[in-house]
């Protein structure tokens, strides 16, 4: 008994812990969300840079329609080939359906009266006229004298034909103010090419900044007179006067290049407008 009384008492304490099996995953979720947001941001930036103003407006209207109305297209392949009898591409049979020439009010409100096919056809027509002017498919329709003075580009507004002065080769005679002979010939060529379509035409004139202020004639008056002269040349070449939508003089307020006195800023801009304008 005495031996048992002096035996030391040993107490074992077991430390119990938990929650160490899986931890530290929250940052992965946050990082994945960050990467997704950055991808969406860069896609948005790319779309803004790769689309035109009209296309961006169409995308905005698609995601926020002003009138909640169902599409007219169906999913079947029956008598209407998957189209509703109210579709613009289906011949009206009951007197109340739509047609391409007489779209319903709902279609007009949805902004679907025009089709992508119409826009593609218009782009093709404008590109064909541009190619004829610049000689992309072979010989150019313009003379050798006029060709170095011309640049063209397709814009949201339409086909822009820019005719500009070069050092030692102005568009208008400095003494008389009359257009050069090659400019008159170019106007006839442009009027002939423009006759292949029915789009409106806008004419704008610009001048280079002058080192000395002219006391007699202002830049506004000079550019307006030049724009009117170009309008008269186009109409003399066969352009229908009713197709001229505007004639504008901009003085030296919108230079194309720097410095403002560069001859390149002395220019005419003839715009074959898109039908939307």
Image (cartoon, rainbow, N blue to C red):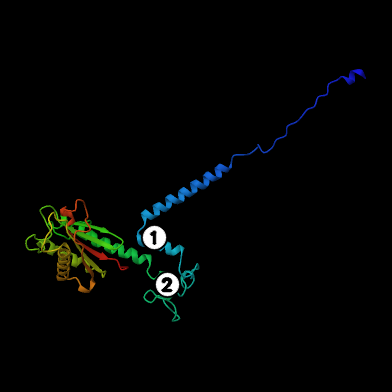
Specify whether 26 is left or right of 198: right
SS at badge 1:
helix
Q: In this view, does 38 lie above or below 90?
A: above
- Could you say where residue 90 lies in the image, as x and y percent from the top left? 42, 74
Residue beneath the point at 91% across and 18% down: 2
Q: Characterize the local packing of mark 2: few (<14), some (14-19) or many (20 or more) Cα atoms within 10 angstroms.
A: few
Name the outermost residue toward the top: 3
Q: Is residue 108 left or right of residue 199?
A: right
Instruction: Work out which residue is located at the far right of the displayed protein and give it.
Output: 1
Residue at image coords 62%, 39%: 23
Q: Residue at x 16, y 60 (%)?
A: 142
Q: Name the residue under label 2.
A: 109
Can see residue 232? yes
SS class, disc 2: helix
Specify the quadrant of the image occupied by residue 99: bottom left
Determine whether, in the image, residue 190 is placed left or right of residue 276: left
Of residues 90 and 203, the one nearer the viewer is: 203
Circle 1 residue: 56
Answer yes or no: do the residues labelled 1 and 2 have beta carbons within 8 Å? no
In this picture, residue 218 sits left or right of residue 27: left
The disc, 1 or 2, on the residue closer to the chain's N-terminal end is 1
């Amino acid at each position: 008994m005495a031996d048992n009384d002096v035996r030391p008492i040993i107490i074992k304490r077991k430390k119990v812990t938990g929650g160490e099996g899986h931890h530290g995953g929250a940052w992965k979720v946050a990082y994945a969300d960050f990467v997704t947001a950055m991808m969406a941001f860069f896609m948005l930036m790319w779309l803004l840079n790769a689309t035109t103003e009209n296309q961006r407006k169409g995308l905005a209207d698609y995601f926020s329609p002003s009138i909640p109305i169902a599409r007219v297209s169906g999913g079947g392949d029956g008598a209407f080939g998957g189209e509703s009898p109210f579709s613009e591409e289906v011949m009206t049979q009951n007197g109340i359906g739509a047609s391409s020439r007489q779209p319903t009010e709902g279609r007009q409100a949805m902004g679907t009266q025009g089709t992508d096919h119409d826009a593609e056809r218009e782009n093709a027509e404008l590109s064909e006229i541009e190619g004829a002017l610049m000689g992309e498919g072979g010989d150019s329709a313009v003379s050798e004298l006029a060709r170095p003075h011309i640049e063209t580009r397709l814009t949201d507004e339409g086909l822009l034909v820019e005719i500009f002065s070069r050092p030692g080769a102005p568009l208008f005679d400095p003494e008389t103010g009359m257009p050069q002979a090659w400019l008159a010939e170019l106007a006839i060529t442009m009027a002939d090419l423009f006759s292949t379509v029915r789009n409106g035409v806008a004419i704008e004139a610009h001048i280079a900044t002058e080192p000395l202020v002219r006391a007699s004639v202002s830049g506004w008056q000079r550019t307006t007179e030049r724009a009117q002269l170009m309008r008269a040349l186009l109409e003399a070449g066969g352009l229908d006067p009713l197709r001229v939508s505007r004639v504008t003089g901009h003085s030296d307020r919108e230079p194309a290049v720097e410095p403002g006195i560069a001859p390149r800023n002395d220019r005419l801009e003839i715009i074959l407008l898109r039908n939307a304008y």
